[in-house]
Image (cartoon, rainbow, N blue to C red):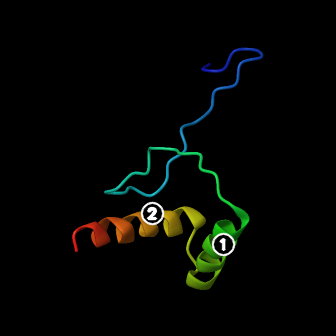
């Protein structure tokens, strides 16, 4: 038996395979105005708040090349 008394064996959670794993976690601070804008973008575009931030980073990075 893999489980001993009082010991809980957690199964590894399996999600969909991805070519671009999101394995870096960041904690960021927003002022109220920036947070509200990010939240509205998330709701209107039907994407996560994290995806709004990632797209924002790509947009700013692309602007550096101009």
Give me the disc on residue 39: 1
Q: Secondary structure at mark 2?
A: helix
* Residue 32 placement (x, y as % from top left): 73, 65
Q: Residue 28: x, y in percent? A: 59, 50
Residue 56 % position (x, y): 45, 68
Q: Quadrant of residue 57?
A: bottom left
> Is residue 2 left or right of 57 when viewed as pictured?
right
Q: Secondary structure at mark 1?
A: helix
Given residues 51 and 59, the one toward you in this image is 59
Looking at the image, is 13 positioned above or below residue 58?
Answer: above
Name above or below for residue 38 compared with residue 13. Answer: below
| Mark identifier at residue 54 | 2
Give the quarter of the figure containing the N terminus: top right
Give the residue displayed 30% in from the left and 72% down from the top: 63
| Position of the C terminus by quadrant | bottom left
Which residue is the extreme one toward the top?
5
Name the residue nearer the viewer: 13 or 62. Answer: 62
10 Å crowding of disc 2: few (<14), some (14-19), many (20+): few
* Residue count near mark 1 (Cα–Cα under 10 Å), binned few <14, some 14–19, many ≥20: some
Residue at image x 31%, y 57%?
A: 19
The spot of residue 41 in percent (x, y) is 59, 78
- Which residue is pictured at 55% across the width and 74% down the height? 47
């Amino acid at each position: 038996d893999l489980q001993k008394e009082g010991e809980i064996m957690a199964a590894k959670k399996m999600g969909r395979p991805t070519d671009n794993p999101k394995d870096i976690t960041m904690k960021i601070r927003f002022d109220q105005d920036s947070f509200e804008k990010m939240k509205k973008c998330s709701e209107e575009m039907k994407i996560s708040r994290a995806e709004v931030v990632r797209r924002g980073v790509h947009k700013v990075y692309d602007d550096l090349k101009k």
